[in-house]
């Protein structure tokens, strides 16, 4: 059984989302700041694996990590892997960048992608990818969530992630969908003696 599971993040928002998604207590240890790994991979999975492996090796604990991004169809998949650092500064700057790039463009199709890596030291690394499809709104709306949430309207809804609230977002998000794929294996691990 995985009694203790470290989440490789310094982001309190992500930590809360992951506790809801996994339905279990996770260890949040942002003070291990020197473990922060450069995201040098060419894919979300490479980055997630790198994070999970480094944090697990340094802490000696099983570790869950993720890497994620927003891919916009009309921008050939940008900002993608660079979603967190496409422009410097606050989330508002990234949203302004995105809306100005899409100004006048009718194609608002986009998807969030998340790759989750579970590393149990000296045993294995498991990677699962999840998606959430939707559209980019014309203007930012809502106060919840983080990042691009105020401009992302998931398919089947008319409100942005930031308006829909914590529970809806975290039931249909890219991270929730990635964890759904991992869950069966996760449960087997938790049931082993
Ligand atoms: P990372 O996975 O921590 O590297 O973050 C990737 C970036 O993608 C974040 O900084 C956000 O800008 C964006 N992003 C990833 N997931 C979400 C989400 O659920 N909502 C809004 N933005 C997100």
Image (tube, rainbow, N blue to C red):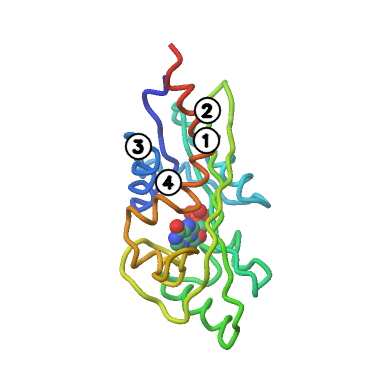
Q: Residue furthest top?
A: 193
Separation (CA) of disc 4 from disc 3: 17 Å
Q: How far apart are marks 2 and 3 (CA)?
A: 15 Å
Task: Give the mark, 2 or 4, whose residue is nearer the N terminus.
Answer: 4
- Residue 89: x and y in percent read 44, 71
Would you name the residue on which mark 1 appears? 182
Count residues near mark 1 (Cα–Cα under 10 Å), then give few for <14, some for 14-19, many for 20+: many
Q: Mark 3 points at which residue?
A: 23
Q: Earlier in the sequence, mark 2 or mark 3?
A: 3
Residue extending farthest to the front is 156
Whether 154 is drawn above or below 42: the answer is below
Q: Do the residues labelled 4 and 3 touch (CB within 8 Å)?
A: no
* Residue at the spot of label 4: 9
Between the C-alphas of marks 2 and 4, the distance is: 22 Å
Q: Residue at the location (53% across, 31% down)?
A: 119
Q: Is residue 185 above or below residue 176?
A: above
């Amino acid at each position: 059984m995985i009694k203790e599971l470290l989440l490789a993040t310094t982001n309190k928002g992500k930590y809360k989302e992951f506790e809801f998604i996994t339905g279990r207590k996770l260890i949040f240890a942002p003070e291990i700041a020197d473990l922060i790994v450069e995201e040098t991979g060419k894919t979300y999975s490479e980055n997630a694996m790198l994070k999970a492996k480094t944090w697990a090796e340094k802490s000696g604990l099983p570790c869950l990590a993720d890497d994620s991004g927003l891919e916009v169809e009309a921008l050939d998949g940008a900002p993608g892997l660079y979603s967190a650092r496409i422009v410097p500064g606050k989330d508002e700057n990234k949203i302004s960048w995105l809306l100005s790039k899409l100004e006048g463009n009718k194609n608002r199709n986009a998807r969030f992608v998340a790759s989750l890596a579970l590393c149990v030291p000296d045993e294995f690394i498991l990677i699962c990818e999840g998606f959430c499809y939707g559209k980019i709104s014309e203007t930012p709306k809502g106060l919840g969530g983080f990042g691009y949430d105020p401009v992302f309207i998931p398919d089947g809804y008319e409100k942005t992630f930031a308006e829909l609230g914590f529970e809806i977002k975290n039931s249909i998000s890219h991270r929730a969908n990635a964890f759904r794929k991992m869950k069966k294996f996760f449960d087997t691990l938790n049931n082993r003696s």
